[in-house]
Amino acid sequence: MAATRDGYGQALLELADNEKVVVLEADLGKSTKSLHFRKAYPERTVSCGIGEQNMLLVAAGMASSGYIPFASTFAIFTERAFEQMRNGVARPNLAVHLCGSHGGTHTGTDGSSAQSIEDLAIYRTLPNVTVMHPSDEVSTRILTKRLASSSNPSYMRTARNKTPVLYDDVSEDTIQIGKGIELKSGSDVAIIACGVLVSEALKAADMLANEGIQATVVDMHTIKPLDTTLIDNVAERCGCIVTAEDHSIIGGLGGAVAEHLSMTSSTPLERVGVKDRFGESGQSDEMLELMELSAPHIRNAVHRAINRK
Amino acid sequence: MQHSIEELEELARKCRIEIVKMVYRAQAGHPGGSLSEIDLLAGLYGTTMRVRSDDPDWEDRDRFILSKGHASPGMYALLAERGFISHDDLTSYRVLGGVCQGHVDMKWCPGVDFSAGSLGMGLSFGMGCAVAAKLDGSERRAFVMLGDGEIQEGSVWEAAMAAAHHELGNLKVILDRNRIQNDDFCESQMRMFDIPAKWKAFGWNVKEIDGHNMNEVVEGMQFLSETNDGPSILIAHTVKGKGVSFMEDNPAFHGAAPNDEQYALALSELGVTV
């Protein structure tokens, strides 16, 4: 078990050999895990205080001067700087890499004020911006490192709490921005998940196997650009799709998949996500249960999808 | 290249003519704030900015960020007079596919260092340029032009606090204190009380000038160039619409174009015989 935010922090350290890599913080480096970089490279770390709007555009100014800025705060607080991201980063296409940690209801006991359930949706609307929500510490580390050579801006959500490590033994080549990863192959249903719900999707697939239902499970860590080739492939092979995300069912991974499928096929789609409501204080596992996001709920959605075939 | 006071005044007069022409042709745009800022832009580019019109992306250039990005006609006129774009390009102001987008845009126009137009963003961006220059060990500076109404945006003060914290002596602000914003006089929209005291309290070096007296403008630019112990701000008291009688101090010409009659009058006041 490990938290994806630790993968982010580790990646920044591994990127430090590139002297153009700089880190920006808004008083949450201990939480987002950029603190390791700050301690090792204080001269390349810019403290912006509790000022997210300023942080985004300081990063933009540095990107325009040839630097590769990684800025982080809680996912929810990045949203305060949405217009800065829109007008000052995405519009001039400056390669600022924004990381929102503590995303989703999985964040837990701080309650609804700290549980971003709309971040993936809002950043997905911005031209030029890559949007990612990796599922484990290893893939977060690898994807963060890949961002350093990307020429466009990005938003990556990480999670506060620990989840299973899924990619301990894989070659780094298998983890690429914009390419979904098929973790399990079956022909009855495809479960496309992101972030903390990928491991729940795998659990659901095991439950379904006991019922004789063979599920494909895809880790769709990149929500934009969406791996539509893989979606078309699993839609044809499995005949129905379930999406799963710790995010509003409006506009996130489920929304993105629905938008694509509506253009290409009549494959039944069921979306598991936060049902247009806010969260509350609770432990991670309690939140996944309350929001109907955990493995049994994904399994139920699979039954609904199969019945619609 | 240094210029005499008379040359700078003449540069500003030529720019004023182009500002009026651009806004008239487009029948839209922002003449008031362009006319209030233009003596400052002429003074800045004529005496201080280290830039190359034949190499606008030169890495070690000073950066200029027109944070009040709607006052773009002033910027475009200046860039044309300084050879970054052609006078022909000025006809593209607010025209589909034009170099001169409605608000200054770094993706469209050579010599523009930031895509502005949404207020309260330029100072933060300029701070990023200043931090980058320090990291590079470069002498380049970041100059940012703010509007006075613009400093009602809270994010300006996030940047003001951060720039002083980071002791950014290479970050220089010019505040165009023309006392009018979109809807009306600033005084009626949001009183700002003692503006110099606010910047001083945030740890900035502050100087006030008459933004239409070219001698004072040049002195102001010297102040910005020579003040390197932390960020500095030149508060320039200006008149919105300066140089065109019916636009002066008139909130109606924050964002409105002259009609045919007004256009002829404006040009004649600026010394153009039509």
Image (cartoon, helix red, strand yellow):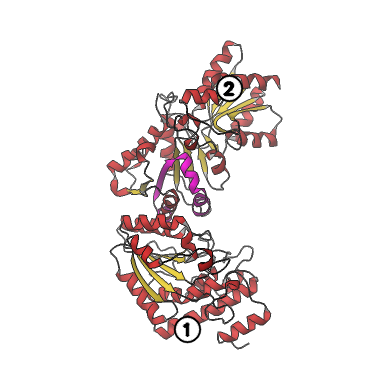
How far across and down, in percent of the image, does residue B168 sit? Answer: 32, 59
Q: Residues within 10 Å of mark 2 (few under 14, many from 20)?
A: many
Q: How many marks?
A: 2
Q: Residues within 10 Å of mark 1 (few under 14, many from 20)?
A: some
Provide the major secondary structure of the magenta segment: helix
Please state which of residues B167 and A134 is positioned toward the viewer in this rendering: B167
Name the image quarter holding the C terminus of chain B. bottom right
Circle 2: element type: helix
Question: Which residue in the structure is indicated by mark 1?
Answer: B10
Closer mark to the observer between disc 1 and disc 2 = 2
Question: Which residue in the structure is indicated by mark 2?
Answer: A298
How far across and down, in percent of the image, does residue A86 sit? Answer: 53, 50
Q: Is residue B262 visible?
A: yes
Q: Is residue A65 visible?
A: no
How far across and down, in percent of the image, does residue B12 sit? Answer: 48, 79
Q: Give the extent of the magenta segment.
A: A62-90
Q: Could you tell me which chain the residue with mark 2 belongs to?
A: A
Residue A66, magenta (yes or no): yes
Q: Is residue A104 above or below residue B15?
A: above
Q: Amino acid at mark 1?
A: Glu
Please state which of residues B206 and A147 is positioned toward the viewer in this rendering: B206
